[in-house]
Image (tube, rainbow, N blue to C red):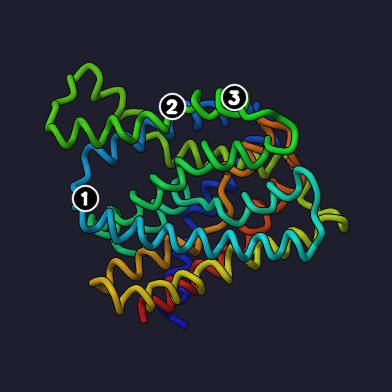
Amino acid sequence: MDIFIHILVNNVIPLSVMIAIGVAMERIFSLNIKTLSKLNFYVFSPAVMFHLLYTTPISAGLIGTVLLFVAIYLLLLAALAEIAVRARGLKGGMRGAMRNSVMFYNSANYGIPINQLAFAGNPYTLSVQIIVMMTQSLLPNTLGIYSVNAHKSNWRAIGRTILSQPVIYVIPIAFLLRGFQVPIPGAIETPIQYLADAFIGTALLTLGVQLGSMSWRISRAQLSNVMISCTLRLVAGPALAALIVWGLGAFVELDWQTASALIVASAVPSSLSSVLLAVEFDNEPEFSSQAVFASTLLSIVTVALVIYFVQI
């Protein structure tokens, strides 16, 4: 119990405080969530992704192992989400909103700080989290955009929207510059560093602003869907990750640090990206906001439990 309380106080509550500040700012000043979402999508997220990929030493072997895990994990998670969608008889945009709330998780503004806190700033586990974050940065900007628009837009319009997302260009550029050891001029490196440093705080505040702008009372019509989403994300998510890690251990070399980092990375709540997509493309914003709110609130306990179990 002492370990659990330590994790709760030192790992999870600091993030909750930042989110609470965002909630308070929204309640007092009524901030513009679309402006904040665009800053996160087009400025802070690409900057931190470039900075982390360019500056963090990540071996090809680790990249391969993590990508193999992520591919298996997302396929199985998508299958679970599809079962839920069909069992509930969801239609139209609600189908994509449910899938997004389960498959897109907060690996950046929640996952990176929780990784740093849970593993005491270990650069190796941070590398694992960065690779997971890379995949979770790509998916909402590609599959996520398709998912919320497929029922109402054509392929050409969806393609143009996807190609306008900077993160899909930042990732290969960062890998190429690092691979060929191309130095970044100080006049460019310094602004990137400033933006990357601002990412976590800004993203947590943005999540708080979004939560503060919505009704905290989950409508009766959406309660079952929200609870299904939270169960799949916070309970089935880490449980599935643990099973995959156990299975992969028979085929690839998987040390405790990598395995633990993958499980913790899979335990975080639904991503703000699902809300930003819902707001940006007017696709079930009420459900998406409520799913993020409920999963973020419940994660205060569930994430602490997951960290507790991997550490013992």
Nearer to me, 170 or 247? 247
Q: Residues within 10 Å of mark 1 (few under 14, many from 20)?
A: some
Residue at left offset 21%, top offset 50%: 58
Answer few, some or many: residues within 10 Å of disc 2's Cα (few below 14, many 20 plus, some between 14 and 19).
some
Q: Secondary structure at mark 3?
A: helix
Q: In the rendered view, would you say 141 is above or below 135?
A: above
| Cα separation between marks 3 and 1 | 33 Å
Q: Say what amino acid the circle numbered 3 marks.
A: Thr
Pointer 3: residues within 10 angstroms few (<14), some, or many (20+)? few
Q: Which residue is mark 2?
A: 166
Identify the amino acid type marked 2: Pro
Mark nearest the camera among 3 and 1 is: 1
Between the residue at mark 2 and the residue at mark 3, the CA separation in whole angstroms equals 16 Å
Marks 3 and 2: in contact by CB < 8 Å? no
Q: Nearer the viewer, residue 293 or 284?
A: 284
Q: Which residue is mark 3?
A: 35
Residue 137: quadrant of the picture: top left
